[in-house]
Image (cartoon, helix red, strand yellow):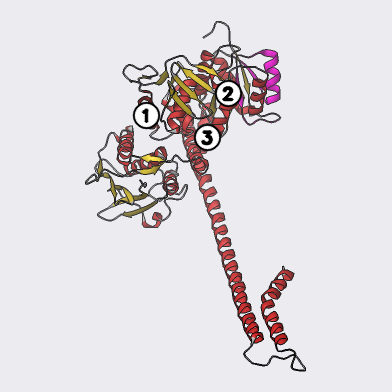
Amino acid sequence: MVKKSWLVLFLIALPLLSGAFVSVLAQGFFQPVPVLVFKIDVGMLAFVAGVIVTLLLLSFYLGGLRIERRSHRMLERSLKEAELGRRRFLRRLDHEIKNPLTGLRAALVNLQEMRGTEERQRAAANASHAVDRLSRLLADLRKLSDLEERSLENLPVDVPELLQEMVDAARSLPAYGNREVNLLISRVPSPFPTVRGDRDLLGVAVYNLVENALKFTTANESVEVRALEDGRTIVVEVADSGGGIPAEDLSNIFEELYRGSNARGVDGSGLGLALVRRIVALHGGEIEVRSRQEEPRGTVFTVRLPVSKR
Amino acid sequence: MARERMTLLLADDDHTIVDSLAPFLERAGFKVLVVSNGAAALEKVQSHHPDLIVLDVLMPRMDGRETLRRLRHANVWTPTILLTQVGEASERALALEEGADDYLNKPFDPHELLARVRAVLRRARPGERSLSAAWLLTAGDLLLDRRARRASVKGEPLDLTPKALSVLEYLMTHPDEVVSRERLLTAVWGWEYPAGTRTVDTRMAELRRALDDDPASPYYIETISGEGYRFIPSVHGEG
């Protein structure tokens, strides 16, 4: 390393040295000691050129060193952040697995020790409920990792049709008993533009948002899905008048397995919004959330996707 | 079921899995042989001629994939279900290439395995190579070239999305079988989608439009209400 930087410094100084040498040479060694005399001739020109080139090289070199050092620092910081994120993720994963596993153990002990048919059936039902929760967690984890590897379809997607389909799918779940969801789509003056991408994945993103909105509202509150476009971007908003998300949770809710204080004890893998964010990013879009817990309460998720070019 | 008990060979190195699966399959009326690696599976196939093999992919000594390749090379066409570890798309494509008759992703419900076993046995023609190992499938005027990922009717190429083509592929390799939407999802999409059944229906509509198949009086694909879909015409495989 040290040797190499000496060589670099020598190369940087080389134009200066050769400029000096040429100028001395041009002055024909007039002086007994080859010292430069200031006069305007070819030699002086070479000398000045050498000085300029050396200065330029030196500034490039030093600038490069600084950039290198800065990017090194940035790399270190992002590595540290990734490491922190990884630890946080493992801690949350541990937490998500612990509960169903505890339930499963208790149910199995009951199954071994209980004699009554009804009791045993209850224990078996509890065990299979715990297994369902673990399976769902695993399935969603796999989806997230699969997203990084699978090739996306890149076909025109009819957004209004997709929104209608996913809204219908979410509200027809037994838990939501066909609750009303307002769907507003701008169609005038021209039909809604298409988005290029993977219809199934975009469907998952929309579905997760709508299902979330239904999950965190009651039948007395409203859920609305609206789509707008400005020719370059389409904007899909999923809004609800539910209890809202605490401000301190807002910046974290897209993280894997993050549970806000109002989402504890609510069913779900804790990966739904992380999936949404990933899918939107894979389509070159972005997602935002705003939420209020005071009147008028509610939450709005805003997804922006680029319109496909014709 | 059949008059005499069918024999299944179960190859998996995880004891907790085989210890629970074997009695379950026996209760369902099968004779179950258990081995814990690929090499032992090959020997058992030679000595006991099972009617069906359930083969885990990740096993010591010889993995399930290599085992299956060797069997097919030796012209042994015993129907085989591969138990795959991860739901990657590439993994599913490979399962086809090696001549597996069906595949299940771990973790699975034992009832699902039983359903697969029964369906594969029903479809199997002893000693013959299965449709899942054929590259060209024909059903009447419909031709599916699985390697080139193309389908045509009377030589006219069909304009299909990759997903719709994969759905057609799955149906054609499982003819006359009622395939549930959930099954199509895990086989073709690789994951269970929350709104998955609608996702399947959308692709099915696309497929029917391309095939010009009337759902009310279908020639190719029949909807079995509440259950799934069935590919009606008989399928011929080659290559």
Crowd around label 3: few <14 · some 14–19 · many ≥20 (10 Å): some
Q: Position of residue B120 (x, y in %)?
A: 53, 17
Q: Report the front residue among A55 and B196.
A: A55
Dots 3, 1 in contact, CB < 8 A: no
- Is residue A38 depicted above or below A78 in this figure? below
Chain identity of mark 3: B
Which residues fall within the magenta stretch? B31-60
SS for callout 1: helix
Q: Are marks 2 and 1 on the same chain?
A: yes
Q: How many marks?
A: 3
Q: Amino acid at mark 1?
A: Glu
Q: Amino acid at mark 3?
A: Ala
Q: Can residue B106 be seen at all in this image of the molecule? A: no
Which of discs 3 and 1 lies nearer the camera? The answer is 1
- Residue B206's tag is 1
Chain identity of mark 1: B
Real-space Cα separation, disc 3 to disc 1, in angstroms: 22 Å
Q: Residue at x 46, y 26 (%)?
A: B151
Q: Report the front residue among A113 and B116.
A: B116
Q: Position of residue A27 (x, y in %)?
A: 70, 89
- Is residue A214 depicted above or below A247 in this figure? above
- Residue on which the image places disc 2: B100
Instruction: State yes or no: residue A310 in magenta.
Output: no
Residue B227 occupies quadrant: top left
Crowd around label 1: few <14 · some 14–19 · many ≥20 (10 Å): some
Mark 2 vs 1, N-terminal side: 2
- Residue B89's tag is 3
In the displayed image of the protein, which residue is found farthest to the left? A188
Where is the C terminus of chain B found, in terms of image quarters? top right
Dots 3, 2 in contact, CB < 8 A: no
Mark 3 vs 1, N-terminal side: 3
